[in-house]
Structures are given as C-alpha cells and as structure tokens.
Image (cartoon, grey):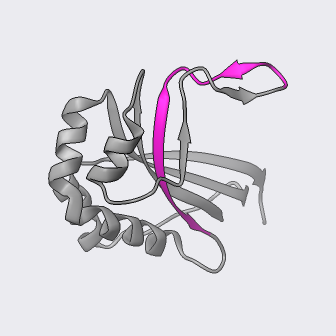
C-alpha cells in the first residue's frame, strides 16, 4: 500500500501567502481556480487549493506518515481554527492506493486525540486495483 495524507484548504479564492505565513510552511502543492488539471479533457480546477502532504509507502507506514503530519500541524491549531472560519473547506485527506482489494490502518489513540485537538476529521479515499490473493 502507498499513498499520502494531505492537509488541504479549498475555496474560490485563497490568499496563498497568508496561509503559508500563518502555518509557517511552504505548501507541497497549490492549484489556482481555472488552472488546467488534465490536458486530455481540458478539465480545470473549480477552486483554489493549498496542500501540505506527507507520503507513505513500503518504507514509511501510513500510521507514521499521519503522525508526522499531525505533529507538524499541532502547533498551529489556533491558526487552523481561523482558517476553518475564513475558508470554505479545511480538511485532512488520506489517499490510499493498493494492488489488493483489502487494506487497513491502525491509528494510535494519540494520533486520534491530536486530530480532535486540531478540529479535523479524516476523509479517506481508496483506489484499489482489485488483486486478491487466495
């Protein structure tokens, strides 16, 4: 299994510099409203987005990647609360990819409590390529 955890902020118009300053970090990725996302079908971004990403793979467990991201965000819980009031969507996403139909993760209570302190839930997006071992 591989993938990433991403702290994301979405709205029609974001102040990218202000967000970066508030969270004292450079984003992993930004997308501007109207920016071309896919050349094949001319799909454009419907809104601005700002992201911090922590990847996981065979070398880094998902639980470890989430804990790292949460620890980066914890000192900024007040700023995150303000961002949640200012912008339409502020959330934490998990993107999981696997060649198999079954996968799982186990998050320790400390990580779950930290998510609560941040006022963030966790949206999970799974892409399974459906292979099954009997």
* Relative to 50, residue 106 above or below: below
- Quadrant in which residue 71 is drawn: bottom left
Residue at 81% across, 26% down: 39
Would you say 82 lies left or right of 48 here?
left
Q: Is residue 96 above or below residue 66?
A: above
Q: Which is nearer the eye, 124 or 84?
A: 84
Whether residue 27 is in magenta: the answer is: no
* Magenta-drawn segment: 40-56
Q: Position of residue 12 (x, y in %)?
A: 42, 21
If the image is split into quadrants, where does the N terminus sit? bottom right
Q: Residue at x 26, y 51 (%)?
A: 22
Identify which residue is drawn at 33% across, 39% down.
90
Residues 133 and 48: in front is 48
Instruction: Please state the horizontal and vertical placement of residue 118, each as a whole percent of the image.
Output: 21, 54
Is 45 in front, or is 123? 45
* Residue found at x 47% / y 53%: 27
Residue 31 point in image, percent of width and height: 56, 35
| Image position of 24 (left or right of 3) | left
Q: Is residue 3 visible?
A: yes
């Amino acid at each position: 299994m591989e993938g990433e955890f991403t702290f994301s902020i979405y709205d029609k118009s974001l102040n990218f510099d202000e967000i970066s300053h508030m969270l004292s970090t450079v984003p992993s990725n930004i997308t501007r409203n109207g920016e071309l996302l896919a050349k094949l079908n001319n799909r454009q971004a419907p809104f601005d987005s700002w992201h911090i990403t922590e990847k996981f793979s065979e070398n880094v467990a998902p639980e470890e990647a989430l804990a790292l991201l949460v620890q980066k965000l914890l000192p900024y819980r007040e700023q995150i609360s303000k961002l949640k009031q200012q912008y339409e969507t502020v959330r934490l996403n998990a993107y999981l990819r696997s060649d198999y139909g079954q996968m799982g993760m186990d998050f320790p209570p400390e990580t779950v409590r930290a998510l609560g302190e941040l006022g963030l839930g966790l949206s999970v997006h799974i892409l399974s390529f459906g292979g099954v071992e009997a």
